Image: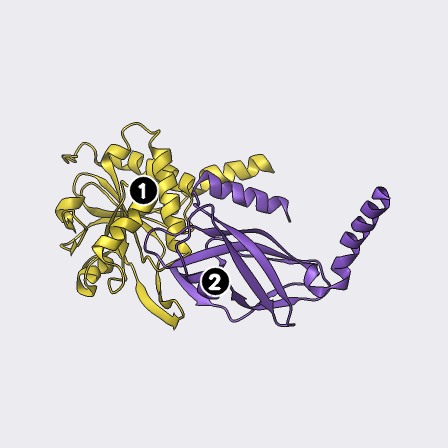
Amino acid sequence: MKHILRTLGLCLFVISPAIHAADTLEAREAWVREAPPSVNVLAAYLQLHNHGAEARILNRVTSPAFDQVEIHRTEEHGGMAHMIKIPEVAVPANGMLIFQKGDLHLMLIDPKSPLKSGDSVELTLHFADGSTLKVTAPVRKADGGAAGQHEMHDHQHQH
Amino acid sequence: MLAGLAIAGLFLPWSTTNHDAQAPQEIMEQPRPLTAFSLQRHEQAPLDLAALKGKWTFLFFGYTHCPDVCPTTLLELNAAHGLLAADPGVLDDTRFVFVSVDPERDTPQSLAAYVAYFNEAFSGATGTPAELAAITSQLGIEHSRGEPGAGGYVVNHSSAVLLIDPQVRYYARLKAPHYAENIRSQFLAIRHYYKRKYEKSYEGNP
């Protein structure tokens, strides 16, 4: 009996992503960078993997922990860093979208209470097809240097 | 293939077409003495020509309402600072300064707390728009307000890290993206070059 239940459970787990469109999207490696004192804007980074056959359009992000969340991209033009607000961004079919330092990121504005390393933040990603994806992102105090290289290393393995 | 990449990696920075083939590519062709400027620091002497004399200074320009580029760069500078601690004597004559180009929201006091979060040895400075222009115009640092959003306005700004030499000259420009290991190796190369070129004539007082 136990064995059958386990098998059934496994089947449901395998089958369910094909049933619900929302389940074809997977968020990985989500985290929020702890902010210095008195700073009211933070950045969140994550990977979105789309296992479905259709592109998914992310057009809004909300969080109970912040007044506002915006999708931003840092762009370099002629030696200047520009921060561009992005209205919507596609997670390609059978592909992925990476939010990472110096690139696409979620700008988290005005935390409702101060956040420290060890806390976690709930983010709700809203897609153009009406579906949503809830993501829990731990707050971390980031290091530069070797830690940053480690992240890139991980990232390459997941391609 | 790997060996080829390693060799290219080793020689590329040096194979510039400059007249001085040995100079690291980040170095200005003509190091330019800075002219008078003065920025405010919290509970510290103003940042001016006198304050810069005798040590190398890393300068980075940004603003605290900047969630991505500025913390990323300051974290890399902090990591570079950590790496340089293993290089004898280097940190003794090196300082790091973050200059806010957003004085409307960043005060010298709030900057001091912001910068100390990344590294207690770093200092923060800012000034009125006119005071800022006196230094940014000499260094080719640009900044302008972008579109207003929910978090207030963004500030687009030069992403380079600049090196001022102990004679208070604009000496080198490190381009983004910044990586701690590269900052360290570029700085060591620049210091080595500088030493060979100027040490005899320089009578600085670190």
Amino acid at pointer 1? Asn
Q: Which chain does the yellow colour mark?
A: B
Q: Total of numbered circles in the picture?
A: 2
Q: Position of residue A80 (x, y in %)?
A: 37, 60
Would you say A85 lies left or right of B46 here? right
Residue in the image at 33% along x and 29% along y: B87
Q: Position of residue B180 (x, y in %)?
A: 40, 41
In the rendering, which numbered label is found on residue A73? 2
Name the quadrant containing residue A66: bottom left
B159 vs B15, nearest the viewer: B159
**Chain letter of disc 1?**
B
Whole-angstrom CA distance, mark 1 to mark 2, is 26 Å
How crowded pointer 2 is (Cα within 10 Å; few <14, some 14-19, many 20+) is rated as many
Q: Is residue A74 visible?
A: no
Name the quadrant containing residue B86: top left
**Chain letter of disc 2?**
A
Residue in the image at 24% along x and 62% along y: B103
Quarter holding the N terminus of chain B is top right
Q: Position of residue A114 (x, y in %)?
A: 39, 54
Relative to A111, does residue A148 appear above or below in the rendering? above
